Image (cartoon, coloured by chain):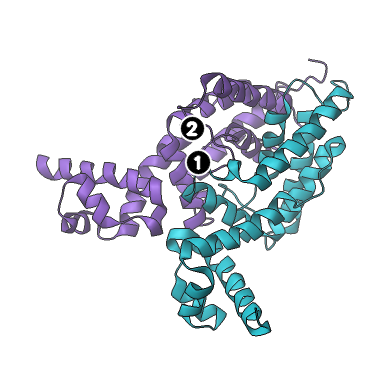
Chain colours: A cyan, B purple
Amino acid sequence: MTRDAAATKAKILKAATEEFAAHGIAGARVDRIAASAACNKNMIYIYFRSKDLLFDAVFAASIAELVEAAPFDAENLPAYAGALFDFHIANPQLVRLATWHSLERPGELRTLPITVESGYRKGKAIAAAQAAGTLYAGLSPEHLLPMVLSLAQTWSEGTQIPMSAEDDPVALAACRRAVVVGVSRLINPDPTA
Amino acid sequence: MTRDAAATKAKILKAATEEFAAHGIAGARVDRIAASAACNKNMIYIYFRSKDLLFDAVFAASIAELVEAAPFDAENLPAYAGALFDFHIANPQLVRLATWHSLERPGELRTLPITVESGYRKGKAIAAAQAAGTLYAGLSPEHLLPMVLSLAQTWSEGTQIPMSAEDDPVALAACRRAVVVGVSRLINPDPTA
């Protein structure tokens, strides 16, 4: 691929990420992506073949970022959830892409190699921490992990009361603190702590 | 309105609910709604004026059902969350409608009178239970309520690992139990219980 071709592809992907995050797969318009990338619409079909395959390319990059948004630490899930909260607030377009994907390609995410591998690895670390007594063991890793993610996403895009980086910083900090406190209570192994 | 007109409107609303739940606002096709309701496309424009206003009519009915999906009981939030879980599994199309709405009309839900009123009423009940010492008081009602809803929706449509009524009943029951246990741990006022 020439340097020009690579640059054009990168511009298309950037414009497509914004368009899909804003409008979803069905709502996205290839015309708008071409205009925003300042390229001919035909180039998009030459490089990516269809709107659906262009979404696949955008989503593959986004989900990799989202799955590894924060370093996973089974010994400190409250801090992990707080870091996820920060990432989601700073990257609302990635959360929107994942939510569109869950609506427009239902059930597909849990079968992707990247999410299967990530879930397996994180589940193993949670099981080890539970065996070591540092995590509450009354919820299996396959249930505990999604619930931690759920709490971390309470105020993300695609929820009823999303926060954004433009919101009142005091309110934002209070939501972040609630996530950290909530996850602590969920996973604390010591009922007297 | 004649009986025929009322029946036609009801058929359109039913078909539109299915279409919007499947495809969202941008993705929905008025042609398909007309075909499914077995009516002329013009009738839809006569009764509802536009696709957007038809969505409004569908959403107003759905959000009312969703907001009052389960009787709210601040004294027993784990049972409330379990009942919400059941409702979401039984009515995936309502959860999908709410999720499309959050993506396609971002920020609108928290300003609707029905959600404002519901949040206010539930928040007051939570504050009273906290004052009475039956609920953990370290999280404000405005944070606790969304977190309870978040946990209840962990396995709903629009999430990474949705469950459905067709899924293995044993797996479904395990997820429901995890929601109830998780909410109990979140709200339990007694650290030794």
Image: B91 above or below B106 = above
Q: What residue appears at the point 60 percent right and 41 percent down from the top-left corner?
A: A110
Mark 1 in CB contact with mark 2 (< 8 angstroms): no
Instruction: Spot the residue most to the top.
Output: B193
For disc 1, the chain is B
Q: What residue appears at the point 44 percent right and 76 percent down from the top-left corner?
A: A31
Residue count near mark 2 (Cα–Cα under 10 Å), binned few <14, some 14–19, many ≥20: many
For disc 2, the chain is B
Q: Which of A59 and B181 is in front in this view?
A: A59
Q: Which of A53 and A18 is in front in this view?
A: A53
- The amino acid on which the numbered mark 2 sits, given as a three-letter code, is His
Q: Residue A86 carries which label?
A: none
Q: Can residue A72 be seen in this view?
A: yes
Image: B164 above or below A138 = below
Q: Position of residue A5 (x, y in %)?
A: 62, 81
Q: What residue appears at the point 72 percent right and 23 percent down from the top-left corner?
A: A139
Q: Is residue A153 visible?
A: no
Q: Is mark 1 on a helix, strand or loop?
A: helix
Q: Based on the displayed image, in which of its 4 quarters is residue B173 positioned?
A: top right
Q: Nearer the viewer, residue A149 or B53?
A: A149
Q: Residue B117 carries which label?
A: 1
Q: Based on the displayed image, in which of its 4 quarters is residue A86 positioned?
A: bottom right
- The amino acid on which the numbered mark 1 sits, given as a three-letter code, is Glu
Residue A118 located left or right of residue A58: right
Image quadrant where one finds the N terminus of chain B: top left
Q: Is mark 2 on a helix, strand or loop?
A: helix
Q: Position of residue B51 (x, y in %)?
A: 31, 58
Q: What residue appears at the point 55 percent right and 24 percent down from the top-left corner?
A: B172
Residue A124 located left or right of residue A133: left
* Residue holding disc 2: B88
Q: Position of residue A170 (x, y in %)?
A: 76, 54
